[in-house]
Amino acid sequence: MLSAASIKDLVNSGAVTWGGELRGDGLLLRLGGPIQPLTDLGAVVDLADQASIDTLYGEQIADWTTYDLAPGQMILAPASEPVSLGPDVMGMIGGLSHLARVGLAVHVTSPFVLPGWAGHLTLELINHSPAALRVYHGMPLARLLLQLRGGGHAAPAHRFYGQPGDLQSHYADDLLDPNKR
């Protein structure tokens, strides 16, 4: 992982674009908006059917300052600051342990951010606590740790992700449709 000094050098050279805070040896990710709650359908969501996946999501909440996350509830939210990584820089998202100790999981899986990424990272927040947890717009949630990778070309930008409002999964459309691979 890169040190704070190395990250500052990458920002100064333009290999990383970041307008947020550097905390320790990582980029501090804060909770942005809008937020996207997932709904309890009481039904099976068919992961091979995009329309079925789309039914999982409630209405986005654009204007908010606090949100009470119920036990077992999940919401999606963008990081407040966009980030762009050069072709030789990749990242790993890690939640803050202070939040994990009260039952808040910040980024569930897939912590890797590929080289060439540009946009707002989407964070998945799940309340594993027996109590409701109040989250605040702009609160620190995670860090993005950076590392250099060997040469070669970065993957092309992903067409679905990176904008603050693009929070939902496009699994069936993107990964299961042979015409879109």
Image (tube, rainbow, N blue to C red):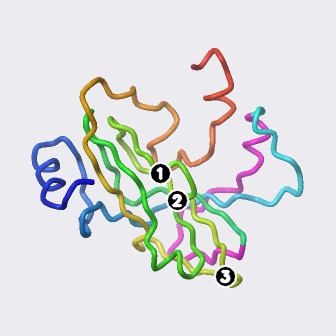
3 or 1: mark nearer the eye = 1
| Relative to 75, residue 57 above or below | above
- Mark earlier in primary sequence (3, 1): 1
Q: Secondary structure at mark 1?
A: loop
Residue 124 position in % (x across, y down) = 57, 58
Q: Are marks 1 and 2 in contact (CB under 8 Å)?
A: yes
Q: Secondary structure at mark 2?
A: loop
Q: Which one is in front in this view, the residue at disc 3 or the one at disc 2? A: 2
- Residue at (38, 44) in percent of width and height: 119
Question: Which residue corresponds to mark 1?
Answer: 111
Three-letter residue code for mark 1: Pro
Check the image and name the residue furthest to the bottom: 131
Camera-side residue: 135 or 102?
102
Q: Where the C terminus falls, by quadrant?
A: top right
Q: Are marks 3 and 1 in contact (CB under 8 Å)?
A: no
Query: Badges 3 and 2: C-beta atoms under 8 Å apart?
Result: no
Q: Is residue 67 magenta?
A: yes
Part of the protein shown in magenta: 50-71
Sequence-first disc among 3 and 2: 2
**In this view, which residue lies farthest toward the top?**
179
Q: How far apart in space, not on screen, are marks 1 and 2 (Cα)? A: 7 Å
Left-right relation of 103 to 117:
right
Q: Which residue is mark 2?
A: 107
User: In the figure, residue 162 lies in which quadrant?
Assistant: top left
* Amino acid type at mark 2: His
Q: Is residue 45 left or right of residue 12?
A: right
Q: Residue at x 47, y 51 (%)?
A: 111
